[in-house]
């Protein structure tokens, strides 16, 4: 029995939700990042949802001659080495690009949730994901997931990993087997920097009385999480979701592991009823190549101190809820790499 040897994964932005299959190996596809690099990735798989309608009051089992109504939701999780801010745009909403900023050849991408249009919030963008698996007998299994949206995104800068990691949860409205093989592996855009962001260069600040304070030296781990609150809505007679219902607001979470060396900073962070504006900057170059997350009005909801073992450092685990989250990304990518 053949076993998986390797895989190719690529994506394209969808112009219209769930209507943009990749029909040939010549279609332009990009890599989303360093997929599965030293971390397990569960590729999206159809999850069967079995339901039946009771034939009488009190019926608790499927009646004789009845069959289950089956529907599918394609879901999965990826562990991805982050190399640009496209993941942030997919999870948060949309981006606007300013050319040649801060210097020639670079662009600044402002990433934020979509603004209401005529009193209604537009739906999140979707992508088509191409998953091609090479088997040990040289056969190829090719599956595509259309109408795919980010169900969650967590950016993780942890000391045990040298580079910035993203955990991306996805939901897809459709899936199909394709009968062609890719001749060329999906690649990053020509101007992209393929190197990951190194955790050691992460800059963490919080703002007190209008003055940002750098607390990077106390940081051990930091996570920024986005949840768009998606729910698959099934259509009668259909085996795939008709659409995804999106929450009326996005949920943001900031988690930090800090060494509480400074009592003044510690008191500021955990003061009851205190909110802070904070930034997390993932850096390749502090002025021309970075991802900056700005979190406003962070309310800290949990903090615990881990008693250290003999000879080890004391660590404080802190969790906060930002009111808003925005990204500013500077790199050499054109705006088309971020938006459709």
Image (spheres, grey):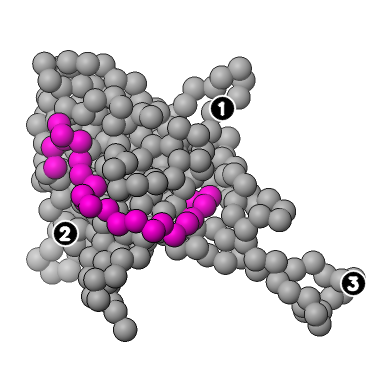
Q: Which residue is depicted at the point 31% across and 66% down?
A: 140
* Residue topped by disc 2: 160
Residue positioned 36% across, 52% down in the render:
130
Mark 2 or mark 1, which is nearer the start of the sequence?
Answer: 1
In this picture, residue 93 sits left or right of residue 333:
right
Crowd class of label 2 (few under 14; some 14 to 19; many from 20; radius 10 Å): few
Q: Earlier in the sequence, mark 3 or mark 1?
A: 3
* Image: magenta residue range: 172-194
The residue nearer to you, when weighing 293 against 78, is: 78
Q: Quadrant of the N terminus?
A: bottom left
For residue 56, the mark is 3
In front of the other: 192 or 2? 2
Q: Secondary structure at mark 2?
A: loop
Camera-near label (1 vs 2) is: 1
Pointer 1: what residue? 121
Structural crowding at the residue carrying mark 1, measured as other residues with C-alpha within 10 Å and reported as few (<14), some (14–19) or many (≥20): some
Residue 319's place in the image compared with 293, above or below, is below
Label 3: how many residues lie within 10 Å, few (<14), some (14-19) or many (20+)?
few
SS category of the residue bearing label 1: loop
Figure quadrant of residue 244: top right
Whether residue 299 is visible, yes or no, is: no
């Amino acid at each position: 029995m053949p076993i998986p040897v390797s895989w190719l994964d690529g994506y394209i932005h969808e112009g219209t939700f769930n209507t943009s299959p990749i029909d040939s190996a010549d279609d332009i596809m990009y890599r989303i990042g360093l997929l599965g690099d030293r971390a397990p990735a569960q590729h999206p798989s159809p999850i069967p949802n079995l339901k039946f309608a009771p034939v009488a009051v009190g019926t608790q089992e499927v009646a004789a001659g009845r069959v289950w109504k089956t529907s599918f939701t394609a879901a999965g999780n990826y562990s991805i080495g982050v190399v640009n801010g496209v993941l942030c745009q997919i999870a948060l909403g949309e981006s606007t690009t300013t050319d040649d900023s801060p210097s020639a050849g670079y662009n600044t991408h402002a990433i934020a949730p979509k603004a209401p249009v005529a009193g209604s919030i537009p739906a999140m963008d979707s992508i088509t994901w191409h998953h091609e698996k090479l088997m040990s007998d040289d056969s190829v299994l090719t599956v595509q997931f259309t109408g795919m949206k980010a169900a969650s995104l967590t950016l993780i800068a942890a000391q045990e990993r040298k580079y910035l990691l993203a955990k991306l949860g996805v939901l897809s409205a459709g899936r199909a087997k394709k009968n062609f093989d890719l001749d060329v592996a999906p690649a990053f855009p020509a101007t992209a920097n393929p190197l990951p962001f190194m955790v050691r260069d992460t800059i963490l600040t919080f703002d007190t009385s209008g003055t940002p304070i750098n607390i990077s030296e106390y940081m051990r781990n930091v996570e920024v999480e986005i949840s768009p609150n998606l729910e698959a809505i099934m259509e009668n007679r259909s085996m795939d979701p008709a659409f995804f219902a999106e929450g009326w607001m996005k949920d943001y979470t900031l988690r930090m592991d800090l060494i509480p060396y400074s009592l003044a900073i510690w008191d500021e962070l955990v003061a009851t009823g205190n909110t802070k504006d904070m930034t997390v900057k993932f850096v390749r170059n502090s002025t021309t190549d970075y991802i900056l997350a700005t979190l406003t009005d962070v309310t800290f909801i949990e903090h615990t101190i881990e008693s250290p073992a003999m000879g080890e450092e004391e660590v404080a685990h802190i969790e906060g809820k930002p009111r808003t989250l925005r990204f500013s990304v500077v790199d050499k990518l054109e705006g088309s790499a971020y938006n459709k």
